[in-house]
Image (cartoon, grey):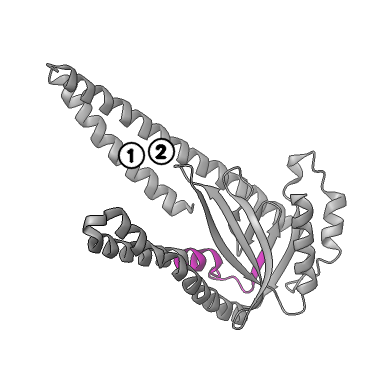
Amino acid sequence: MSKSLTLIFVIVFCLIALFIGFVGIAVLTAGPTNETEWSIGLLGIGSATLLFFGAFKTFQGQRQQARAELFESKRLMEQYAAKPKALVNVTNQVAEAEHSVDKSNPSEGPQIYARWVYNHDSWRVILAKLSDKTRKEEFYTAFWFPILFAIVFFAWWYVGALVGVVVGWLYIRFRVYFVQQKFALPPGQIDAEAIISDAYLRINGNFIHYADGKYFLKNLMREQDPKLGEYLHFIIGWVTSKGYPAEMDLYLPIPVGHTHEADLVLEAYKRARG
């Protein structure tokens, strides 16, 4: 979850908590006359407390993650400070990392599998193609939303179908926005950079975690697209608050002449899975 979305989440939950808490306090201070009023008052205060606690934990978790990302960014800057702004050959880097990183000591940081750099112009083209591919791929998921909502509403199936269309459209827009936000080249940055590790994918300074206790790397494949060319397909999974499995697809183009490095990344991923 991005910082802006987390902040919105926290603010909304706090506002809901304030409203529910105000209702609960108002009922109790007015002098409850029966069990129902007592229940409403106590449940209101209890629910508000839980909502405030959830918002606090979410905000606290975001701050901890932000500090961890800052520390990792500094570590990466030191590691690649002497590297030229060109595609880095990681053929030997992965092997070196396996010997240099002490897995028993978490302070060593995540294991870096590859670092790729793309020039500014090519990345602009890539980002446009990534957005288009994401839009098309997620359409197949959004296609089922009207059908699902129509079944849920049943008697008002046409209302459900309309709601499903709107939800599906918002879902596609959100997924494309997520890709554009995470993959965008920041102002002033000359080249685009992608770092693949055993814990995250870092695109132009933006972390996409898949080993933080909530998200995990469900699968990693090398595929090819007529427009995008060869790319790594990351399938990131997690479990929703309701206990349902969920996943998200991300695509990272493989620089020309670096397919062997992509194979090394896949081998490292397979070894990590055992």
Q: Is residue 190 magenta?
A: yes
Going by the numbered disc 2, the residue's amino acid type is: Ala
Residue at mark 1: 14
Q: Which badge, 1 or 2, comes first in the chain's sequence?
A: 1
Front-most of residues 211 and 138: 138
Q: Are marks 1 and 2 in contact (CB under 8 Å)?
A: yes
Label for residue 23? none
Q: Is residue 273 visible?
A: yes
Between 185 and 198, the one nearer to me in the picture: 198
Q: Quadrant of residue 79?
A: bottom right
> Where in the figure is residue 233, as x and y percent of width and height?
63, 66
Which circle marks residue 55 in the picture? Answer: 2
In this view of the protein, which residue sits in the foreground, 151 or 101?
151
Q: Residue at x 53, y 63 (%)?
A: 182
Tell me the residue at 79%/60% (across/down). Answer: 267
In percent of the image, x 51 and y 66: which residue is there? 179
How far from the left and from the top, in percent, is residue 221?
Answer: 68, 65
In this picture, residue 154 sits left or right of residue 236: left
Left or right of residue 112: residue 23: left
Mark 1 Cα within 10 Å, few/some/many (few <14, many 20+)?
many
Residue 81 appears in the rendering: no
